[in-house]
Every structure is written in C-alpha cells, then in structure tokens.
Amino acid sequence: MTDQATRAAGPAPSPQRAARDVPDVPKEPVFTTQDLNIHYGSFHAVTDVSMEFGKNEITALIGPSGCGKSTVLRCLNRMNDLIPAARVSGEVRYHGIELYGPKIDPIEVRRRIGMVFQKANPFPKSIYDNIAYGPRVTGMKVDNMDDLVEQTLRRAALWDEVKDKLKQNAYGLSGGQQQRLCIARAIATNPDVVLMDEPCSALDPIATLRIEELMAELRELYTIIIVTHNMQQAARVSDRTAFFTVKVNETTGDRTGGLVEYDRTTKIFENPSDQRTEGYISGRFG
Amino acid sequence: MTIVSAPIEPPSVEPPLSLEPSSRRLGEKAIVALLFAAAALAVLITVGIVLAIAGPTVEFFRQIPFSRFFSTEPWAPNFVPDGFGVYSILAGTASIVLYSCMIALPAGLGAAIYLNEYASHRARKILKPVLEVLEGIPTVVYGLFALAFVAPLLQQIWPTFLPGKLGDPPGFQFVLSAGVVLGIMIIPTVASVSQDAMSAIPGGLREAAYGLGSTKMQVATKVVVPSAFSGIVASFVLGLSRAVGETMVVLMAAGAIANLTLWPNDPVLTMTAFIGRTATGDVGFGTTTYYTLFAVAALLFVITLVINTISIALVRKFREVYE
Amino acid sequence: MRQSGRTRIAVDAARAGTESLERRGIDVKGELFRAVLLLCISIGIVMLATLLAYVIVAGWPRLDLSLFTEMPSTRDPNTSGFLPAIVGTLYVMIGVLVTTVPIGVSAAIYLEEYADSSKWYNRLIEVNIQNLAAVPSIVFGILGLAFIVRGPWGLGFVAFAGSLTLMMMVLPTVIIASREAIRGVPSTLRHASLGLGATRWQTVSRQVLPVSLPGILTGTILAMSRAIGETAPLLLVGATTFVRFLPEGLFDGAYSVITVQIFQWAMRPQEEFRTLAAAGSIVLVALLLLMNSVAIWLRNKYSRAY
C-alpha cells in the first residue's frame, strides 16, 4: 500500500547522493550465495539466487511482495531456522565459510550478523538494558558497560536524545527513536554485518530520513544489507541494488521468488538491463 | 548530524573465523532435558493412574467374578452376605447426572448465549467474574449447602399431592437436592466453554445476518448456535463428565444407599461417593473392600476417559472449522 | 460439506431476516427469549447469593477467634476449632506450591518454546495434559493412595502425600495457564533476542518469562485456590484422621485440612456441628474469594501490557 503511494508520487527515483566509487563487482565479498533455494514446506519461496554482498557497502534488496527478498535476508543470519518447515539448499558462504554447514552454530552466526526488524521491537526494559542485553548474553568482555552503552548510543546518534533517561523504559520513546534504539542494540555487540528488514516501513518520513542518515554513517563500520519496499530509499542509501520478483511457472502455475538483476544502484536506477527491472522502477508493474 | 567518532575499533573479522559453537552449551542442553522431563511427567501421571488402578482391579476380579460385578445384585461390598452388583451405583451416578444436567445444560447454554449476544460490555465484565466465583466455591461448601439448606427446603415444599412414589416426601438425603446443587455448580463450566465457541465464530457471519435485518433472537438461534454447535456439544459433554466425577456434593447430600432407582426422592450411592465413603472408613489394606475401591475407580476412570476423549475431539473439530 | 453447511446457515438467516421485516410492534417471542436467557444466567447468581447468605447466617454464631485457635473436639462443638486443619492446609499448600510451580512452568516452557508439535511424543504429552485436566479429582486420590501413601513411594498418611496428590490434580491448570501466558509474549521479542545471538534459554529466561510472569502468577493463584478448596482426593490420602494436635511437619504425623474438617463437622447430626462447618466455610470462601480477586486484578492489570 504505502510503497504504491510513494511510487505514484513521482517519476522514477534517481540516486540523489553523490555516488560513491562503487566497483563493478564487490571487492571483498562478505556473503556469497550460489544457487540458493529456500522452501517452506512444499512452497518453493526462493529459486536459484547467486550473488555477492560487498564489505562496508549498503546493499538494498527490492521487489514486489512475495518476491522472497526478506526470505533471502533472513537466511543470511539463519533466522529462517526459527521456522520449522523452512529448508535452505545451495550455498551461502560468509567469509568463505558455508553458513549451513553441519558444524555451524546459528547462535554464533547471529552474534556476528545483527538484525533490525520491520517493526521496532525494543525489549520492555530500560534503554540502558536494551543496549547492554547483547553484550551480556553473548558473554562479551566489557570493561565498563556504562561506556559501551554511551558509545553505542552516540554511534547510533541517539545519545543526546536519551542520555537523561537511560533508566526509563524504552517503550516511552517515539517510534523512530525506538527503531534507532534497535539499530543501536544491534551494533552494541560490534557485529560484522547488520541486516535490516524494512526498518522504516512503520515510520514517518522524518524518522525515515534520520535512519537513512544513520545508515550512511554506519556504512563506514559495518556491512549493511537492507530490504525495502521503498525504491527511493534504495536509491538514496544503497551502493548496490538487487531486484527480485515473483516468477510464475507457466506450466504448473507455481509462484516463486527470484533474483532478476543485481548491479550498482546507479546502474539499476538509471540504466537497468532487464525489462522487468525497468518496469518496476518506473512503476509499470509490481 | 554529527557523530562522535567512537573509540571502538571498526569490527574486524580476525582470521581464523569460526562459526562453530564457542562452548558446548551443556547447561542449555541440561535445561532442555529438565524441561522435557517436567512435560513428560504428565504422561507419567497418566501411566501411574493406569498402573495404580490396574493391579488391584485385576486382584479384585480374581476374587469376584465379572458376572457378579456387572449384575443387578445388591451393592454391599463390606457386608455379610456381600454383594458386588455395580449396576446399583452406576444407576446412582446416572440419576445424579440426569438431574444435574437437566439444570446445567440448558441454563449453561442460555447463560452463554446471553453473555455472548445480549450482555453489554459492562454487564459481561461483572457477570463473568461472578460465574468464575461460582466455579471457585469449594465443593464441600456446596455439599453443606445441599445437605443443610436445599434438602430441608425441598422436603418442606415437596409436592406430596403427586401420585404414587413421586408424592412420597424424601428423607434428609436424596438425589434431587444433590442434583440441583451440582447442576448449578456446573453451569459456569458449560457456559464458559460454550461461550468460547460462540465468540470464535467469525464476526462476518453474524454481521451478515444482522445486515439482512434479523433480530437478535434469530441471530442467536439460527446463526450463533448452529455455527458453534460442536463447541456447545463439547461443553455439554464436559459438564456431563464433571457430573459423573464430582464427589463431595453427592457424598454429603445424595445418601449412602446403593439403590437401583431413578426417582428424584430416593437416596442413592454413586461411584464417587462409594469411593469417598469407603476411604473415610477403616479399610484394611488387602481386603476385598480395598480392591473394590480400585475396581470402581477403574470403571469411573474409563467412563470419564471416554467422555473426555469425545469432548476433546469435538473441540478440535470445531477449531478446524473456524481457525 | 462444511461450506454447504455454512451456506445453509446463511440462507436460513437471510430468510429469517425477510420474515422479520413484515412483523410490526413488539417482538414478543424475542422478548420472551431474552427473559429466558436472563433467567438462565440468574439461576447461578441467585444460587451464589443464597449460598453465601446461608453460610454467613448459619456460621455467624461461631465466627470468632476460637475458631482459629482451638483444637477440634467431638464432645463440645462450642469450643471446637480449626487450628490443626488450618496449619495442615498451610503445610499441604506449601508442598503443592513448591512442586507444582516449577514443574508446571517448566512443562509449559517446553511445550511452547522447544517442542516440535509434529513429533508424536510431544503430541502425546499435549493430549495427556488435556485428559488429566478432566480426570475426576477422586481418581487422583486413588493414585495417591496406591503410589504415594503406600506402594513404591510409601510416604504414609502425611501432609506431603496430600501435597503430591493435589499437585498431580492442579498441574494441568498451571501448565495450561502458563502456556497461554507464554504464547501471549509477542514473537518480535523472541526474534530480537535471538537475533542478537542469545541462546534459546537466555531468550526464555530473560525476555519471555518476565513478560509472561503476571499470567503465570494468575494461573498459579487460581490453581492454588482450587487445591485449597479440594476435598475428595484428600479423603483417600489421610486427611481424614481425627487430629487433636498440630501436624509435626510435611513428612511426619497425621494431618487434616480445612475442607475435610468442614466435611466431618457437616456430616455430624448435631446442629451445633453444622454451625461449626458453616463458620469454617465462611473462612474458606473468604480466603478463596480473596485469592480469586487478586488473580482477576492481576489479569486485568497486565492484560493490556502489549
């Protein structure tokens, strides 16, 4: 609904930020997927995704509902494990290590690959305890928790707003602040990657802008992969964009999600090579 | 927006990166095992019930033949000459179930319809806790009430003009006083399970009927009750099961005489009351009377198990339709 | 099949609707129906009021301090009291509390957070809990008599035997209530915690349990009040011994409880003992009403936390 509205608002968005030097292919891939397929029971959710995610880049996954972009994202830190019927096949390599290998512990994976969810989900605890939770449960060696909380909140550009109410319940914050707190919480354990699953879909434009600014700052430190419904957002913040769509098997009528085109964001938005991408970008379908 | 550059080093993945478990998480595994054990205890209790009852019951039937137990001979396990015809106390249970369900089922259903379709939000907020309190009164207090208040009252107003057996004034313990009290005691159970079923009906069905100009009564009788039917039946079955299994009210108010009768003014002995009464007396371990206790308990357990299985299956069927 | 059933219902309703359009004036049938429904719900309320009035009027003469401080006596009902029964109830309930809560909550956590319900043994556990919840209470007494008082455990007729018997009886209540409370915790919280690299147990113990605590507490209070008010199974596991002294402990000596004491007074022919039973009932009902009110208050207070 909302992205329909945003899309109708104007012509095809173009990358507004002065484009960074984005190499043609990711130089230092953090993730590499090869023929990734994901099933939910008998439903084939994602078919044959092969792509690389670059270090300290922001990669945006866009596409219509049901195209499997969130499913792919959740597969990168093994959150799909929480769905009993989910099955992953193909390869997902993280710094060369097969993420779905037999000895891999999903808990260790999630400690390195943080996640921010669609709806802000702070714990019903104080702001301080929200930040300290990750370091505490992961057994991180922390000399001074107060310092860590402060640094984390500063990094998330939230410190000035909350420094006087660290002991208050996080539910007292505004929606945008809650989502930034969730980002702060995710980076408190100093992860390598932060996955964001439509982090702004429940926020107003001003709160959205603040989060986008924050992402730009955080790119220097973390690899960020974001799923978004909002094409302008992808154009504004990302270095690379992957366009997914729903593919319908003409003989069986089965629907499955798949990757159509993956390239530098400037290329995707200015000169897409696939017609389907162009159609989606210019709002012709989706 | 400025960001104070943080003194923390940018994250670096130091080789060799390992994603294998950093510890064996034995504590975690031990906890899961403990939690599973706690859940499995429920199965163990059931097995325990079956074992506890089975052994002595087998012993009972070694001493008393099947044909004597399932017969109409008098029920007098601890008398001389003894008698073990379980039909007499089965009849007692049936009689109690008959009179209590005559009250509990219609009244419970009516209460559920009222709560779900008629009561205002405020009325419901008062009525539901009242029903919960009714459910929470200890059965021994109900028993006292039946014995010391309801029975004398019924004795006084007994319609003695009725012809034949029905016109005989009852003694101080008889089926009807226990049945009435037990029936009212069960109303909340029937009402709450029925109402759960009614409130699970999709609102659209109800709105469609109202949209067509139906009255409240028509919605209640033609839409709500038929749609929630299996849930309502489940509540009836559950009420029935409670009537079969209730001990204190019948033990205190229904009497102590095993009686192959369904008259409302007769005293009866039910299966539960027999167990309760025998247990309060002196029962020598290993006597035939002791084993009788278990044989009756076995019968009671099997009957309620069958009833409950029906009820659970009905509730599940209802859920499948609407959830 | 089902679809056609629902269609039929809808058609019936539609027909009923058109019929009613033709009717004018007061809907006599409808009003009568409402009156009958009101009667149905009133029966229970009137009965409750009568019952409370009866026990208060009947028990009032003996509702004094000696009720709490005196030993029971079969000779003089006027100086007879409930002291050993009150202490016995306390002992039994402590035993119920310390066994039921950890087992019940653990079982609920397992079933909600860990169990894969497609596995046969987990389904078996679920069906068992449902069935146990509907087993007549006196059957638990039989189990207690055969396995706890005598048999393999052989505790004898002591307070803890009563505790274990009641524990088995109220365990399903605690499990079912705790499961509902745990299920009420939004899954976003679990995902947030797991996404940070917390283990299952860390997530359960630090996020899920604190949030579901009010619900678990409500269920526990209701289960405890059920156990306090229970009589039948205790008749079989020793609470009927006539005790003129305080129980020595959870594992030693004879014991009695309030409900059984009420039962025994009520069954005596003399009117004075009935008065005593009614006075004991007032105390018991007041205690249970208090517990229920606390539970309802807790539930309402926290029901809209999320």
Image (spheres, coloured by chain):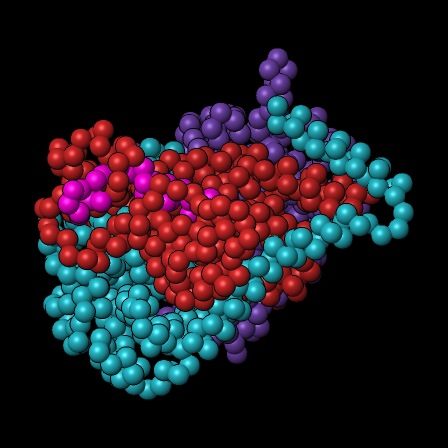
Q: Residue at x 84, y 37 (%)?
A: C19
Which residue is at the front of the view, C72 or A285? Answer: C72
Instruction: Tell me: B37 left or right of C154.
Output: right
Q: Residue at x 66, y 57 (%)?
A: C38
Instruction: Tell me: C245 left or right of A202.
Output: left
Q: Position of residue B287 (x, y in %)?
A: 11, 46
> In the displayed image of the protein, which residue is found farthest to the bottom?
C65
Q: Residue at x 33, y 77 (%)?
A: C272
Q: Answer above or below: position of B178 versus C78.
A: above
Q: Is-magenta flag for residue C231? A: no
Q: Position of residue B30 (x, y in %)?
A: 22, 50
Q: Position of residue B24 (x, y in %)?
A: 22, 47
Query: The chain drawn cyan is chain what?
Result: C
Q: Residue at x 66, y 61 (%)?
A: B121
Which residue is at the front of the view, C199 or C19? Answer: C19
Which colour is chain B painted?
red
Q: Is residue B242 visible?
A: no
Q: Answer above or below: position of A171 versus B80.
A: below
Quadrant into which the C terminus of chain C falls: bottom right
Q: Position of residue B82 (x, y in %)?
A: 17, 42
Q: Is-magenta flag for residue B90? A: yes
> In the displayed image of the protein, which residue is found farthest to the top?
A251
Which residue is at the front of the view, B221 or A102? Answer: B221
Instruction: Tell me: A23 left or right of A2.
Output: left
Instruction: Tell me: A282 left or right of B75.
Output: right
Query: The chain drawn purple is chain what?
Result: A
Quadrant into which the N terminus of chain C falls: top right
Q: Is residue B300 visible?
A: yes
The residue segment tinted magenta is: B76-102
Which residue is at the front of the view, A266 or A179? Answer: A179
